[in-house]
Amino acid sequence: MSSTPLANMTVEEFLANYWQKKPVLIRQAFPNFQPPLEPDELAGLALQEGVLSRLIMEKGGDYPWQLKHGPLPEDTFDDLGDEYWTLLVQEVDRHVPEVADLFDRFHFLPSWRKDDVMVSFAARHAGVGAHIDSYDVFLLQGSGKRRWEIGRPGAGTAPADGGIRANHSASQSQSKDYIEGLDVRILADFEPVEAYDLEPGDMLYLPPCVPHNGVAIEPCLTFSFGFLAPSRADMVSDFGHWYEENHEIIRYGDPDLLEGRKEGLITNNDLNRVLRVLQQTVIERDDLARWFGTFITRPQRGPADTEEFEGTFDDFVQDFEEAGTWRRHEGVRMAGWVDGKPRLFVEGEEIDHDLDGEAITRLTSNRCFSHAACRGRSDFLRVLYQLTKNGRGYLVSTQEESH
C-alpha cells in the first residue's frame, strides 16, 4: 500500500486533530512531486465530449468573471493571454490512471467517501474567487506557486450543490452571501485570517464550510481531491424511496376522527398520526447497509466510460494470466458490508457473489490485483470476470503497470 501523504504527521494525529475539524498545511506531502499530466494535456481533456470542464475568465472575457462550460472549442486558448484565467477539469482520475493512483494514497479515509480529482490550471494572478465548499478537500500543488487565503469558518453558507465542483452557473442558486450578477460564486464579504504560499508537493486540507481563496503567484497546476458529504435531505429522501420499493407502503390513516373539528385546521391529533406513520418505519441494520451501499456508490455525474469484455470466463482467466494485472476502472465506485451477510456494492447496485467477508474487504480496499495473488480463487476470479464483463475493470500488462 502506498504511503500516506501526511509528511511527518501520523494518521491518528490527522484524524484526531484536523479531519472535519480545521485546516492544516502539509509541507511536502508528496515529496519531489512530478505532475502526472501537463497543462497542455489538461487543456486537451477540456476539448473532449464527456469531460466536465469549465473556463473562468476574471478578466479578458466579454464581462468580468465570465464562465464557459466544456467541451471547449479548439481555438479557446489561442488568445487568452498570460493572466487572469483558470481552467478546471473534473473527474481527471477517470481519464488519467496515474491521477487515480494519487487518490489511492488517501487510503486512511473511506474509499466510498471519494468524489473525484479536479485539476485546475491557473494563469498568473488567476483564481476562481473566494468561496465555500460543502465537502472535504485536499489541495495539492502540482506545479508553480499559489497563495491560499483562509477565512473564518461560518462566514457564509456553503451551497447545497457542493461548491466549486458544481457543473452549472452560480446564478441558479445565488444567495446574499455571494456577489450578485456573476457567473461564479464569489463571497461578498471575505476576510482572510491566514495565508499560505504553496509550492509543488505542498498540500492544504480544508474541512467543509471553510472560506478560502486561491490565487496563482505564477502559472500553476492544482490537484483537488474531493470527498463526498451527502446532505441529510439527500439521504432521507433517497432512503424513503428505497424503503417503499423494498417494503410494504405505509400511508397516513385517520379512522379515529372525532366530531366537531374545524375542517380547515390541522390538529394535534392529526400531527400525532403523522408521527406514528413516520415512527412505523422499522429499520433493520442489514436494510440500512443495503440502502446505503447502493446510495453511496452511485455515480455522481453519470456512469464511467468503460468498455465491456465479450469473452468467456475461461478467456478472461487466460487473458488475465498473460497480462498479469487487473485494475478496477478508475471511474467505478465500490463498497462492501461484512458485519452481517457479506454484501458488495458497485455503481449503485448490489452485486451477486460467493465471496466471504475477507475477500470483500480485500476487493473493496484495492483497485489492482496480480494474477498470482488470485490464482486458485475461482470465486474471486469470477467476480473480477463479472466486473470486467460489465466494463468495470480491465487487464493491463504487469510490465506496463510497473511503469
Image: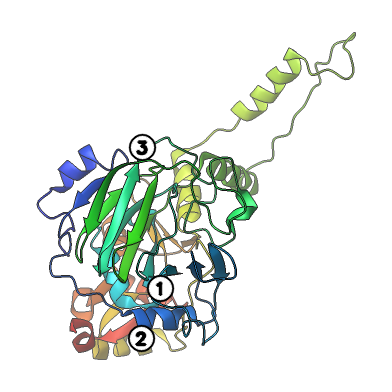
Specify the amino acid type for callout 2. Phe
Mark 2 closeness class: few <14, some 14–19, many ≥20 residues within 10 Å:
many
Q: Secondary structure at mark 3?
A: loop
The residue that label 2 is drawn on is 316
Mark 3 closeness class: few <14, some 14–19, many ≥20 residues within 10 Å:
some
State the image coordinates of residue 120 (x, y, percent, origin top left): 38, 68
Residue occupying image coordinates x 69% and y 40%:
249
Specify the amino acid type for callout 1. Arg
Mark 1 closeness class: few <14, some 14–19, many ≥20 residues within 10 Å:
many
Q: Which of the pair 127/62 is nearer the observer?
A: 62
User: Which mark's residue is nearer the viewer, 3 or 2?
Assistant: 3
Q: CA distance from mark 3 to mark 2?
A: 54 Å
Q: Which of the pair 183/331 is nearer the observer?
A: 183
Q: Which mark, residue 152?
A: 3
Q: Which of the pair 311/189 is nearer the observer?
A: 189
Where's the N terminus, which quadrant? bottom left
Residue occupying image coordinates x 27% and y 73%:
368
State the image coordinates of residue 43 (x, y, percent, origin top left): 42, 80
Q: Which of the pair 391/3 is nearer the observer?
A: 3
Q: CA distance from mark 2 to mark 1?
A: 23 Å
The residue that label 1 is drawn on is 94
Q: Secondary structure at mark 1?
A: helix
Q: Earlier in the sequence, mark 2 or mark 1?
A: 1
Marks 1 and 3 in Cβ contact (< 8 Å): no
Q: Earlier in the sequence, mark 1 or mark 3?
A: 1
